[in-house]
């Protein structure tokens, strides 16, 4: 099957899924999310695939966030739905039943950081940069970030990253436990494939059982935390600040927030 915004390649029991909108730094639009859902369901049910690697096209970005153009029309109700439906796609990754490795090849901002965090293992290139810049747009992370970031790096660091919107470079991401390893960009896919092959060489019943076991403690608090996240994301979408933040980005100017 061919996709408009994804490249999918299968070899040696690995499915390599590449988000392919390099001119928009692989920002996630509705099409990408729907195609991602399709591919995830397909690889989940494909007995020839044991491990999935997720990456972005080009040398600059893994995913620079959700597509800000598609945010601008959201109101409280549609914002809540937007958040819940994105969360559902990312939950599919976390609960795929097969390991998913994120090969983070540059910017992983907003939805991009959240996408990487929904994966089971994160390898970063040396030019990778992580961040949750949503507060600059008048919203909060809406694809699981408010729940998953603290689980990975601890609540204090998660608060700092989400409240300041500051970017975290690859070495800092390694230091705080946001990524498993950092490698030169040219070696990233090779490193991800080597890790995938190591996993594939083990018993897959054990690998898949371990995946479920390690995920288990997060399960119910994550779903209730995400329901709250979607509710609050929707509320942000009804604010003037959200309209101003997204419009200012698209008009390439600094946002002037009125705090209402
Ligand atoms: N949504 C929509 N378009 C995006 C995007 C996003 N999240 N991120 C980047 N783009 C687009 C830019 O608008 C630009 O498009 P254009 O060439 O048609 O003007 C193109 O991708 C290249 O981005 P540009 O900003 O020119 O690259 P840069 O190297 O100067 O800056 C970033 C890179 C990642 C720092 C910057 O693009 C950015 O801040 N992106 C938004 C990040 C964000 O807030 N994500 C969270 C969204 S919830």
Image (spheres, helix red, strand yellow):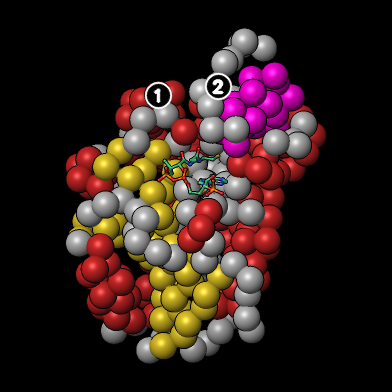
Task: Give the residue drawn at x 29%, y 80%.
Answer: 197
> Does 147 lie within the magenta span?
no
* Residue 213 place in picture, x, y as percent: 42, 60
Quarter of the image for the C terminus: give it.
Answer: top right
- Residue 257 falls in image quadrant: top right
**Disc ID at residue 255:** 2
Which mark is first along the chain, 1 or 2? 1
* Residue 41 place in picture, x, y as percent: 62, 72
- Residue 210 falls in image quadrant: bottom left
* Stretch in magenta: 231-250
The residue labelled by disc 1 is 164
Against 175, residue 133 (above or below) is above
What secondary structure is marked by label 2?
loop
In the image, 13: left or right of 126? right
Question: Dots 2 and 1: beta carbons under 8 Å?
Answer: no
Q: Distance between the residues labelled 2 and 1?
A: 15 Å
* Residue 24 place in picture, x, y as percent: 53, 54
* Residue 65 place in picture, x, y as percent: 51, 46
Quarter of the image for the N terminus: give it.
Answer: bottom right
In this rendered view, identify the residue nearer to me: 159 or 33. 33
């Amino acid at each position: 099957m061919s996709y408009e915004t994804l490249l999918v390649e299968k070899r040696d029991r690995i499915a390599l899924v590449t988000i392919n909108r390099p001119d928009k730094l692989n920002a996630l639009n509705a099409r990408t999310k729907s195609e991602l859902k399709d591919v995830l369901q397909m690889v989940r049910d494909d007995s020839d695939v044991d491990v999935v690697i997720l990456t972005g096209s080009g040398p600059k970005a893994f995913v620079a966030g959700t597509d800000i153009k598609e945010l601008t029309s959201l109101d409280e109700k549609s914002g809540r739905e937007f958040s819940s439906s994105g969360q559902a796609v990312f939950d599919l990754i976390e609960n795929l039943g097969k390991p998913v490795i994120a090969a983070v090849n540059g910017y992983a901002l907003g939805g991009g950081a959240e996408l990487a965090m929904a994966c089971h293992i994160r390898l970063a290139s040396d030019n990778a940069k992580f961040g949750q810049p949503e507060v600059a747009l008048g919203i909060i992370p809406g694809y699981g970030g408010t729940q998953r970031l603290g689980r990975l790096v601890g609540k204090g660091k998660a608060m700092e990253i989400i409240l300041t919107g500051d970017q975290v470079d690859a070495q800092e991401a390694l230091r705080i436990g946001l990524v498993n390893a950092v490698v030169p960009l040219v070696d990233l896919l090779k490193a991800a494939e080597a890790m995938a092959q190591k996993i594939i060489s083990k018993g897959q019943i054990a690998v898949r059982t371990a995946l479920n076991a390690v995920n288990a403690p997060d399960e119910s608090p994550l779903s209730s935390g995400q329901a709250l996240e979607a509710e609050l994301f929707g509320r942000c979408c009804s604010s003037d600040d959200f309209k101003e933040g997204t419009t200012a980005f698209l008009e390439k100017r600094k946002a002037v927030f009125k705090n209402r």
